[in-house]
Amino acid sequence: MKIHRFFVEQEIANKEEIIISDSSLLNQWRNVFRFHSDDVVILFDNSGFEYVSEIVSLSKKESVLKIIEKNKNNNIPKKDITLFISLIKKDNVEWVLQKGTEIGVSRFVPIVSERSEKKDLNMERARKIVEEASEQSGRGVLPEVYEVIKLADVFEKFSIPKIAFDFSGEKFEKEKFDKSDRLGLLIGPEGGWTENELKMFKERDVMICSLGPQILRAETASIAVASLLLL
């Protein structure tokens, strides 16, 4: 029988008991999963550990759980990948957040580029998506979701090696990056990078790579290249 996993914001550490008062989580437990006392769940608190826990009591206001077992979560991405994605349509961004989390992306940085269709992102909604995807996929640590920044600020705030993807670039060969533990992937908007942006990448020694002659949608390119590097 599958034991369901849930993220909790409070630190569990070495506690023998934990009290949950998150109304959204309590509602989910009571009305969606129909949990009762003696049911068992797995909790994780972003520490890299997960806790097999037995529900002692469950009401509208709080739930008391007894910690039965503490285990190290070994579901660790093989590379530290930062996905810099230009803002695109809401549903497509959310799909990238969900699937990127499942694949093992370490952080998402939404960026505004010259051809971005949107200028903002619902951060509360974005973080909820990666939380739920982490629960489902067995991750022990949530990927980070950063506030929206301008493309130019990427180079000031992130010093990691970066690859920009554009059909005009050289052929992407993942073998070249097998020994790279940390990488930043720059994905343009649906209209692609502008000439000014491609020039900026070259001036900053950012490698420009192509995934092939076919022109991919931004969300497809994001998950395709993350999959090649992480799976």
Image (cartoon, rainbow, N blue to C red):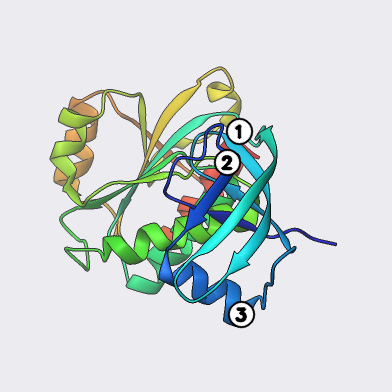
Q: CA distance from mark 3 to mark 2?
A: 23 Å
- Which residue position holds label 1? 76
Place of residue 203 in the rendered image (x, y in percent of width and height, measured from the top left): 18, 26
Residue 201: horizontal and vertical position, in percent?
23, 33
Query: Quadrant location of residue 179?
Result: top right
Q: Of the residues shown, which amino acid type is indicated by label 2? A: Gly
Q: Is residue 151 left or right of residue 100?
A: left
Q: Residue furthest top?
A: 179
Q: Is residue 88 above or below residue 212?
A: below
Q: Tell me, yes or no, whether the two marked residues, 1 and 2, touch with CB atoms within 8 Å.
A: yes
Secondary structure found at label 2: loop
Q: Secondary structure at mark 3?
A: helix
Q: Looking at the image, is mark 1 or mark 2 nearer the viewer? A: 2
For label 1, count other residues whose C-alpha is less than 10 Å away and answer few (under 14), some (14-19) or many (20+).
Answer: some
Position of 114 with respect to 99 (left or right) is left
- Quadrant in the picture for the C terminus: top right
**Residue farthest bottom in this picture:** 31
Coordinates of residue 22 in the picture (x, y in percent):
42, 64
Please tell me whether mark 3 or mark 2 is closer to you in this view.
3
Camera-side residue: 31 or 68? 68
- Foreground label between 1 and 3: 3
Of 121 and 116, the residue lying toward us: 121
Which residue is the site of mark 2? Answer: 140
Label 1 sits on what residue type? Answer: Ile
Residue at image mark 3:
32
> Who's the residue at 22% across and 68% down the image?
117
Q: Is residue 215 visible?
A: no
Badge 1 or badge 2: first in the primary sequence? 1
72 up-or-down from 226: above or below: above
